[in-house]
Amino acid sequence: MDLVATPKNPVPIGASVGYIDVRKGIRLRYASWQSSLKNRRGTVCIFPGRTEFIEKYFEAVGELRRRGFAVAVLDWRGQGGSSRLCRNPLKGHINDFAEYEDDLAHFMRAVVLPDCPTPYFALAHSMASTVLFKVSTKRGCWFNRMVMLAPMVKVLGLPVSQKLCANLADGLTLVGLGRRIVPGRQQEYWSSDRFEGNPLTSDRERFLRNLSVLKAAPSLGVGPPTIGWLKAALSAMGELGDERFAPRIRVPVLMMAAGDDQIVSSKAIEDLAARLRAGSQIVMRGSRHEILQERDSIREQFWAAFDAFVPGAAVTTTSLSRAS
């Protein structure tokens, strides 16, 4: 699948698009762009959250390129333009978050390391942050710094405690129900096309822009998660919650919590930040879950924090305007 353009969401010029063959039946879609400036500052790798797709980050791609970065973006297995894991392609499924780690490793070796300038920085949203945290505990991590947007440290809205929910998901998976959809009200926002009351963004135009992409290419969409995905996610979040985990993170981290998040716990993000050896947390007041899809006043705060944290990101207004 090529990148999908809509009138309000054109493909940034200079895109390189392709697929990575992970194994038989699993192909990952990716896209990359070189910097818009001669003075390159490295590469920002964007890792979308659950249900997201490359096209959702076109605006951010342009903003990063104008700052002098090359950009590379991945569609995780099971979503976007990558291979789906269930007969019903709308089911959001995974067996273990280690499979996402495998996706990331293939992406770095096939796309980023051969073709993108160093140093490398990670920009991860929600579910992707959970994957990146685990990767950052290992020797040879590729990234100099990581920026985590509304990281999925703990989810909200579970009907019972996270531990009990994990036990239930484990049991249901063991008896062969791992590919069944998670029941309950958690499903409601995944497929909603109503702006009013949505928990993702308070910016109507960006909400409608993302919806227009899905209307143009319904195959990019993903529905509710499966019990298997929930089991894998709760297991991964359980590791993050262990107080011995955070000191093992080897990469400086900036976490940005959404002040009005209804999907992940801002308190859990704060608790994790307090245990990091090299990291900090900022609360984006008034933001819902998808910080980069928010209104301009919130996004301006994001970019100010990003520019202060990522080496070489801050450039003059003149440079940005010349590159536009």
Image: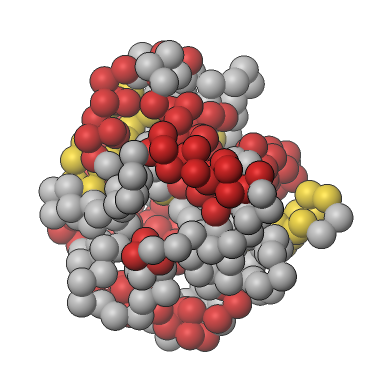
Q: How far across and down, in percent of the image, does residue 78 sit?
A: 63, 60
Q: Residue at x 53, y 29 (%)?
A: 134
Q: Nearer the viewer, residue 247 or 234?
A: 234
Can residue 245 be seen in the rendering of this structure?
yes
Q: Residue at x 26, y 69 (%)?
A: 198
Q: Quadrant of the N terminus?
A: bottom right
Q: Is residue 121 left or right of residue 118?
A: left
* Number of residue marks: 0
Q: Is residue 285 left or right of residue 148?
A: left
Q: Residue at x 29, y 63 (%)?
A: 200
Q: Residue at x 13, y 54 (%)?
A: 286
Q: How is this picture coloured? A: secondary structure
Q: How far across and down, in percent of the image, does residue 4 sit?
A: 56, 77
Q: Residue furthest right?
A: 24
Q: Nearer the viewer, residue 47 or 220?
A: 220
Q: How far across and down, in percent of the image, does residue 293 sit?
A: 31, 62
Q: How far across and down, in percent of the image, does residue 44 sit?
A: 49, 44
Q: Nearer the viewer, residue 174 or 107?
A: 174
Q: Quadrant of residue 174?
A: top right
Q: Quadrant of the C terminus?
A: bottom left
Can residue 72 be seen in the rendering of this structure?
no
Q: Nearer the viewer, residue 145 or 214?
A: 214
